[in-house]
Image: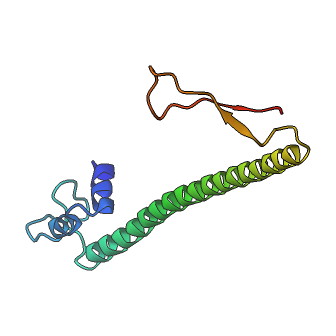
Amino acid sequence: MAFLTLFRVATGDNWNGIMKDTLREDCDSQPDCYQNCCVSPIVAPLFFVVFVLMAQFVLVNVVVAVLMKHLEESHKQQEDDLDIEAELEAELAAQEVIIAKMEEDSIFPTTRSHIPKVLSLPDNFVYTYFDDT
């Protein structure tokens, strides 16, 4: 129960209510008390405030650490995407240079002739082929 109580205080779930319960006046102030014992009116608030501040500090650091990890992973993913994009652009530029060189060397003829349309085909359907002459 003590661990669950400390967890409840650490998460901020009505910790001030628990602190007020420790400061009640109808308690047993004997040194050998086992039930319904009293706590010093100075020690209890000091303990709870320090515990809550330290617990919140630790929890906030954990949240920040998780956020930083996700930010770092997304940054790495973005860098990987940019590297892949740059490689693809370089490959595309190299292919364009090769095609331009092939066109200069007359591997691909530049004139095109149209095959007449077939009546059963739609109006926008056109066959093209390269003329070797």
Say which quadrant the C terminus sits in: top right
Residue 18 lies, in percent from the top left, at: 19, 64
Q: Nearer the viewer, residue 113 or 14?
A: 113
Measuring 71% from the left and 54% from the top, which residue is drawn there?
A: 83
Q: Nearer the viewer, residue 11 or 18?
A: 11
Q: How is the image coloured?
A: rainbow
| Residue 47 in the figure: left or right of residue 70 | left
Whether residue 66 is situated above or below residue 127 in the rendered picture: below
Residue 44 lies, in percent from the top left, at: 27, 72
Residue 65 lies, in percent from the top left, at: 52, 61
Whether residue 88 is situated above or below residue 15 in the rendered picture: above
Q: Nearer the viewer, residue 9 or 70?
A: 70
Whether residue 27 is situated above or below residue 125 in the rendered picture: below
Residue that protrudes farthest toward the left in the picture: 26
Q: Quadrant of residue 107?
A: top right
Q: How many marks?
A: 0
Residue 112 lies, in percent from the top left, at: 71, 38
Residue that protrudes farthest toward the bottom in the picture: 42
Measuring 25% from the left and 65% from the top, which residue is drawn there?
A: 31
Residue that protrudes farthest toward the top in the picture: 120
Measuring 42% from the left and 62% from the top, which residue is drawn there?
A: 59
| Residue 72 in the figure: left or right of residue 133 | left
Residue that protrudes farthest toward the right in the picture: 105
Measuring 39% from the left and 65% from the top, which residue is drawn there?
A: 55
| Residue 6 in the figure: left or right of residue 74 | left
